[in-house]
Image (cartoon, rainbow, N blue to C red):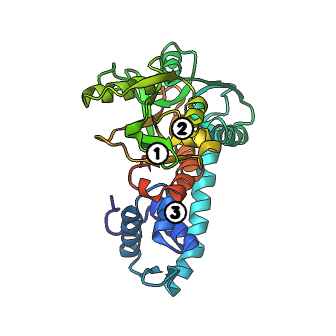
Amino acid sequence: MAEPEGRVSLWGIEVFLTTAEEGAISAAARRLGVSPSAVSQQISALEVALGATLLDRGARPVRTTPAGAMFRRHAQTMLNAAQEARAELARADLAGLTTLRLGMIEDFEADVTPRLLSGLATDLPGCRFLLDTGPSHRLLDQLETRALDLVVAADLPADSPGPDGREVHALLTEPFLAVVPRGADPATLPMIHHSARLLMGRQIAAHLAREGIAPAARFELDSYHAILSLVAAGEGWAILTPLALHRARRFRHEVDLRPLPFAPFSRSLSLSARAGVLRDLPGLVAVRLRQLIGAEVIGPALRDWPWLEGRLTLAP
C-alpha cells in the first residue's frame, strides 16, 4: 500500500536505495522479497511526498535523476540513523534480559539462524542464548508450556485452536510445489510422501484429500534430504516448498521444480511469543528475520526460479 501523500516512510527510503543500487525494479523486488509493483508504488509515493522525480525508470539500467542523487545521500543517512536508533532502544529496553530461549524450525539452521543469533548477541551483550530446533508443532507446544520465549514455526491450519495469549508476527508465505526427477513426468512415478507425523506432511495429505487425489506411494519420509535424494535418483516425485530446496541445497540442480498439477496451496511462517512478556523484542526480531530471509532464501530462489515471483513472498 502506498503511503499517504506528503509522508516519507523508512520503507519507501529503503526501496528507493535498493532500486538505485540494483539498477532495476525487478532486481530490487527480488532482493527485498516483494513484487515489482510494490517497489514501483513505494517509489512513486516517495516522489509525490518529496515533489521530485528521483529515478529515471525509462533508462536501462534505472538511474537516479539529479534530485535522486542528492536525496540518496540524505536517504542513506536517515536509514542508518533509524537502524541505530532501533538497536539502541532495544538494548536499553532489554538491558536486564539475561536469557533468551529461541525455538527455530530446522529449515533455517544453516544460515538464517546463525546470522540472527550473531546479531542478537551484539545487541544484547549480557544475554545468554538457548536454541532449540525442531518441527513446528513441537516448538509451538514448548512456547505454550513456557519452555521457550520466541518461536519461528509454520502456522497451524485454520481449524486449529487460536494463538490465545500470543503475539504473532508474519514472516513468509511459500507455495507447495512439485519436485520431480530431471525431465520426468510425475504422472508416471509414485509419490514420495512427507511423513504425516509432521505438520507439513499433514498439510499435504489434507490438501490431497480435498482434491480427491490418492497418488501411489512407496515411501513416507520425514527428511528433506532423504526425500530429495530419492527424487534425484528417479524413485518418485514429491510435494515440497522452496525452503526444502534451500535447506537441502545440494539437490537444487539435480531435480526440476514445477507448479503443482492440481489446485495450488501454500503455507506461512511466523514468529510467535507470549504477548507483552518481551516488550518490543519480538517485533524487532521479526524485522531482522524478514531481512535475513529476503537475502538468504527469497533472493536466491527467485534467481533460480523467476516464475516464483509473487508466490514466494515476505510478509509486509
Which residue is denoted by mark 1 in the rendering? 184
Q: Which residue is mark 2?
A: 234
In front: label 1 or label 3:
1
Residue 224, image x, y percentages: 56, 32
- Determine whether label 1 and label 2 are within 8 Å by CB: yes
The mark found on residue 14 in the picture is: 3
Q: Earlier in the sequence, mark 1 or mark 3?
A: 3
Q: Which of 181 and 103 lies nearest the eye of the viewer?
A: 181
Closer-to-camera residue (144/86): 144
Question: Disc 1 to disc 3, how far (Cα)?
Answer: 42 Å
Instruction: Work out whether mark 1 precedes mark 2 in sequence or the reverse, and give the earlier one.
Output: 1
Q: Residue furthest bottom?
A: 66
Question: Which amino acid, mark 2?
Answer: Gly
**Residue 209 coordinates in the image, percent (x, y):** 28, 25
User: On screen, 190 above or below 70?
Assistant: above
Up/down of 208 relative to 26, above or below: above
Which SS class for mark 1? loop
* Label 1, label 2: how far apart the Cα atoms are: 8 Å
Q: Residue furthest top?
A: 145
Identified by mark 1, the residue type is Ala
